[in-house]
Image: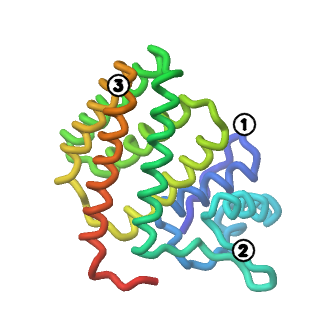
Amino acid sequence: MLSSNELPKHRTKEEYAYDVLRTAILRCELKPGEKVVVDTLSAQLGISPIPIRAAMQRLQSEGLIEITPHTGAIVSELSPSDFEPVSLLLEKLEILAFEIATEKATASDIARLSQLVDALGEALAAGDMERWAELNIEFHGTVASISNMKLLIEFSNRILDAWTRLRRWYLPPIIAQLPEAQSEHRRMIELLKQRNIEELTKVVTAHSQRLRGYAHQATTHLPDQ
């Protein structure tokens, strides 16, 4: 059951429907392959079908919903085999984002990244996996945003969304992986301050390869879909 909280006055009904659906999909509350029925959502959210359909079109453009004419809509499917291409794309996009950030990042940008890493450390110390995961996505999305390049930001966010869904749907808690990931985040910031793209590339590659290896190990027993 989706939340039907009262619509804030400053948001449109389409934005409300979009936010609720997007959050539910990323959290796997709406499961991969699950039917998305407009009339059901209309009743749950207390709004008409028109803004819901508009929101679903936006989500289709982001790869989160698949709409088939005369058939209906489903939440986009996931497969264990998606880990490899998603991780590789994320790695390459992040290398590019850091390459641009070494030229464009301001002191304020670096301070923001440092704040996020500090917050990641607090979540790690508290054993709060979900908070850590959310901040981790924000950290990597912030690196892309420094580029101020619309397509890079858009592609990075889409790949980060895919990674979020895959992690939540397939991976068990990865607390054991987090201290090393946290150390790599701090190293990334140090190298960004030094504008050292060569070493940054090595750290980003190692960061991605380690998580890719963990995902492969964790999902080898799962059937492909």
| Residue located at (56% from left, 64% from top) | 2
Q: Dividing the picture into quarters, in which one does residue 22 lie?
A: bottom right
Q: Secondary structure at mark 3?
A: helix
Q: Secondary structure at mark 1?
A: loop
31 displayed left or right of 134: right
Q: Which amino acid, by three-letter code, is at mark 1?
A: His
Q: Dividing the picture into quarters, in which one does residue 37 lie?
A: bottom right
Q: Within 10 Å of the Cα at label 3, are there few (<14), some (14-19), or many (20+) other Cα atoms?
A: some
Mark number, residue 44 = none
For disc 3, the marked residue is 114
Residue projecting furthest to the top: 107
| Residue located at (50% from left, 22% from top) | 103
Q: Is residue 22 above or below residue 117?
A: below
Percent position of residue 102, x then y = 46, 25
Q: Earlier in the sequence, mark 3 or mark 1?
A: 1
| Residue located at (71% from left, 63% from top) | 56
Q: Within 10 Å of the Cα at label 2, are there few (<14), some (14-19), or many (20+) other Cα atoms?
A: some
Q: Count the marks: how many?
A: 3
225 displayed left or right of 185: right
Mark number, residue 10 = 1
Q: Secondary structure at mark 2?
A: strand
Q: Is residue 29 above or below residue 22?
A: below
Q: Which amino acid, by three-letter code, is at mark 2?
A: Ile
Q: Nearer the viewer, mark 3 or mark 1?
A: 3
The one of 189 and 205 positioned closer to us in this rendering: 205
The one of 27 and 61 positioned closer to us in this rendering: 61
For disc 2, the marked residue is 67
Percent position of residue 92, x then y = 47, 48
Q: Within 10 Å of the Cα at label 1, are there few (<14), some (14-19), or many (20+) other Cα atoms?
A: few
27 displayed left or right of 194: right
CA distance separating discs 1 and 2: 29 Å
Percent position of residue 171, x then y = 31, 66
